[in-house]
Image (tube, rainbow, N blue to C red):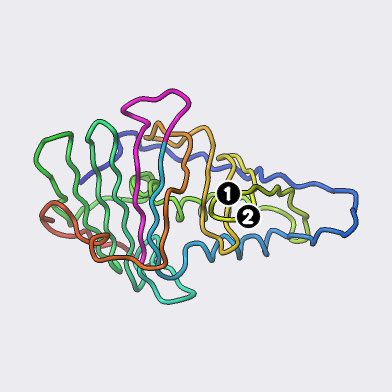
Amino acid sequence: MFIVAVLVVIGIGVGVLAGTTTPSHPARPVVTPASFLSLVRSGIEGTFSAVYKLSAPTSSAESDATVTVAQRAAPGTTAWPGGKPGEWSYRLTYSDGLRVEWLVRGNLLEDCWRVRKSKWRCSVGNYPGDVGIGYTIATIPYLPGMAFMSLSIALEAMPPHASLALHSELSSFGPLTCVRDDDGTWCLMQDGHLVNWTGLGFVGYSWTKASLVSEQPTAPATDFTLSGVPRGPWLLPPG
């Protein structure tokens, strides 16, 4: 089983910036924590596939990578993080050839990995221990889920009627709405899908920036087909 070596609690902050602004003409609509969280949630629902480029200020084999994330779920629902109907996956490829593939179907998890040109290795399954922290760290490359987890913790800790300090950006994917928390700055499309993230990084990973390369509203079968031969799935607790 591919397990990130450093098993420590992820320090997800609750520091989403809030503030007051002087009304302009026309006045901007007030965005509350609940309304923005609804937007974030829509970004992890339904069926989709997306490719992100991962990087850091200093290029290295440990930071330069691409990740393909995909999900198949009914409209208005998500299969993430596990134990729910549907399926989700990520395929992480580093510039030095390290590859990790992660697939969750309902409450079953299968994963495989390859170091450079070595043979693919896959999980044995039936892990008897507590997979809580390790599972969270290992699923960080599934960026839509990471965005929702980080922002939901921050937004739910705010007063219900707080006004969020958001800013807008333009991208090749259309207008973006961006917000900052202690994990970094997250920029979302109008449908809630993540386009950019910039921060200090996460435990076990060297990249500090993620940028959307492409996306589609479908998820091909190849996104849910492991390159190795799984030796047996893990059984996840109900979601």
Among the 4 quarters of the image, the one containing residue 183: top right
Identify the residue position indicated by label 1 in the image. 171
Identify the residue position indicated by label 2 in the image. 175
Residue 199, which numbered label? none
Q: Position of residue 103 (x, y in %)?
A: 27, 58
Q: How many marks?
A: 2
Extreme-front residue of the structure: 172
Extreme-top residue of the structure: 58
Q: Horizontally, is 85 left or right of 121 in the view?
A: right
Give above or below for 162 relative to 55. below
The stretch drawn in magenta includes residue 62: yes
Q: Which amino acid does label 2 sit on?
A: Pro
The residue lying toward the viewer, choosing from 113 and 29, is: 29
Q: Which residue appears at 75% of the width and 47% of the height?
A: 18
The residue lying toward the viewer, choosing from 153 and 213, is: 213
Q: How far apart are marks 2 and 1 (CA)?
A: 6 Å
Q: What element carries label 2?
A: strand
Q: Horizontally, is 3 left or right of 50 in the view?
A: left
Magenta-drawn segment: 55-71
Q: Which residue appears at 59% of the width and 42% of the height?
A: 185
Q: Which residue appears at 49% of the width and 74% of the height?
A: 76
Would you say the residues marked 2 and 1 are in contact, meaning their CB atoms lie under 8 Å apart?
A: yes
Q: What residue type is labelled 1?
A: Ser
Give above or below for 22 relative to 184. below
- Few, some or many residues within 10 Å of mark 1 (<14, 14–19, 20+): few
Q: What element carries label 1?
A: strand
Quadrant of image for the C terminus: bottom left
- Few, some or many residues within 10 Å of mark 2 (<14, 14–19, 20+): some
